[in-house]
Image (tube, rainbow, N blue to C red):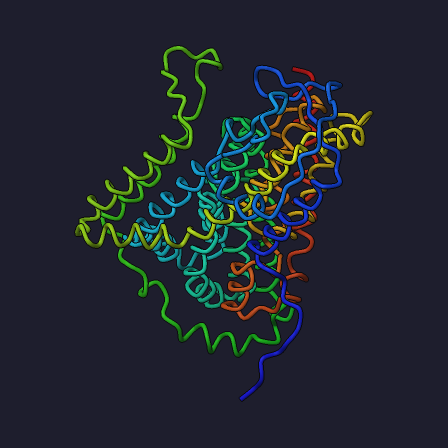
Amino acid sequence: MSEEKKGFKFPSAYTILFILIILIAIGTWFIPAGSYVYDEEGSPVPGTYHELEQNPQRLRDVILAPINGMYGIENETGNVDVWNYGALFGAIDVALFIIVIGGFLGLTMKTGAIDAGIARITDSMKGREKWMIPVLMIVFAIGGTTYGMAEETLAFYVLIITVMIAAGYDSMTGVAVVMLGAGIGVLGSTINPFATGIASGFAGISVVEGIGWRLVILVLGTIMGIWYVMRYAEKVKKDPTKSIVYDKKEENEKVFLTKRDSDAFPEFTTKRKWVLALFALSFIIMIYGVIPWEDLGITFLPTLWWWFPELTALFLLMAIVIGVVARMSEGELTSSFIEGARDLLGVALIIAIARGITVIMNNGLITDTVLFWAEQALDGLRAVGFVEVTYFLYLPLSFLIPSTSGLATVSMPIMAPLADFAGVGRDLVVTAYQSASGLLNMVTVTSAVVMGGLAIGRVGYDQWWKFVWKIMLMLFVLVFVVLAIATIVGQSV
């Protein structure tokens, strides 16, 4: 019996965030307190920073921080000069939304509709596996950009790798189809509630602001990914020795070609087609509900002014409708919803803990001081420079805090107002954040999705890096260029 290897293990997001709460509480004893004057929209007015009396945070404040962050209880100093971020946005709306959408996704997955749909695509394209690569990558990218498809992809690796090996490709091709497809979708998140939705909420903007540029990243990134994977796959088919995992060729053929393929997946029945249609309709309604049609000068469509409370109700209702259409029993419907909600309970807790950091900073009166220091550091930096620096900054932050929800909750209360100083839209900060996070999450060793997918595909992490580094560089440059163009266009409007 082999002993477990001992060594450094990167701490979880929970631990990192708790440590940050403690460190920032200590910082409130030394960092000067201060505040800006805020306009009616809650944006800090440049040049109005002034110092205030110190309000250091103690042990009791540290312990209560995540709880107060969940409820939005802040600005207990009684100083009217301090902008009350808590009144603007508490974490409880977001946390409840995450839990409900977890139930919605869990119930939909329980119907087998998504599994059956992807298996049907795979089945129908046997003999045309070359074209299966773009079709499946687009499907996974849609999943990534709409609802942050990640852990759900683990169910498809065996099926797709088996088909790719049988077609004369290798296991790396199968892994890349799934991981890059969904990963690029998340990188180019348009309405992904776990990245774009949460970040937009804490930035104080609508989720549809900046969606055009995110669509550009999504479409161009997906095209680049498809080209990259197809090019590699054709090279391997012509000469198997070109495979990065050629040393495992015979073993992989024995392992995967004896596994069950699409027969292990549910049948794509009419009922499951209706479920998929309702699933897609939920996100279409979500988009419609959050778009401020009035502000766009569109009067023939009513503006609903929906945000997290209404969206939570939407996904709760649609989960029930999907359960009824799938002819689930009352017990099966509720248990499936609760199981899905339980899977995302950890994300809701991360949001509460991360929001606790903002509470400590706000009640310690140091948030605006940090903004002031950043304003001074960015003084003279052009708008494009600010956006690109933000993008670069989010790369190491995404490694430090691998939870996209936690990173958005921690960083947006600081980074979004900085955009006001630089004269750029807050939506560009959201795009920079989600693009950097999405890029890192395709390779980070702290991701269960990455390491799990590689383990299923029998691909070493070093082999994955050898395969993926070029497309990672291409995607990095793509985002860099799109952010620059978006900023220039925004400045000229």
Confirm whether residue 289 shows in the render.
yes
Confirm whether residue 482 shows in the render.
no
Relative to residue 244, is residue 73 depicted above or below?
above
Closer-to-camera residue (168/388): 388
Occupied quadrant, residue 383 = top right
- Residue sitting at 75 percent across and 38 percent down? 31
Residue 394 position, x and y percent, is: 67, 43
Closer-to-camera residue (378/179): 378
Closer-to-camera residue (269/82): 82
Occupied quadrant, residue 235 = bottom right
- Residue sitting at 65 percent across and 52 percent down? 400
Judged left or right of residue 235, residue 118 is left
Relative to residue 193, is residue 448 depicted above or below?
below
Residue 170 position, x and y percent, is: 54, 66
Residue 193 position, x and y percent, is: 46, 39
Residue at the extreme bottom of the image, as rendered? 1
How many numbered discs sit on the rendered protein? 0
Closer-to-camera residue (474/365): 365
Residue 306 position, x and y percent, is: 40, 26
- Residue sitting at 35 percent across and 38 percent down? 280
Which quadrant, please, contains the C terminus?
A: top right
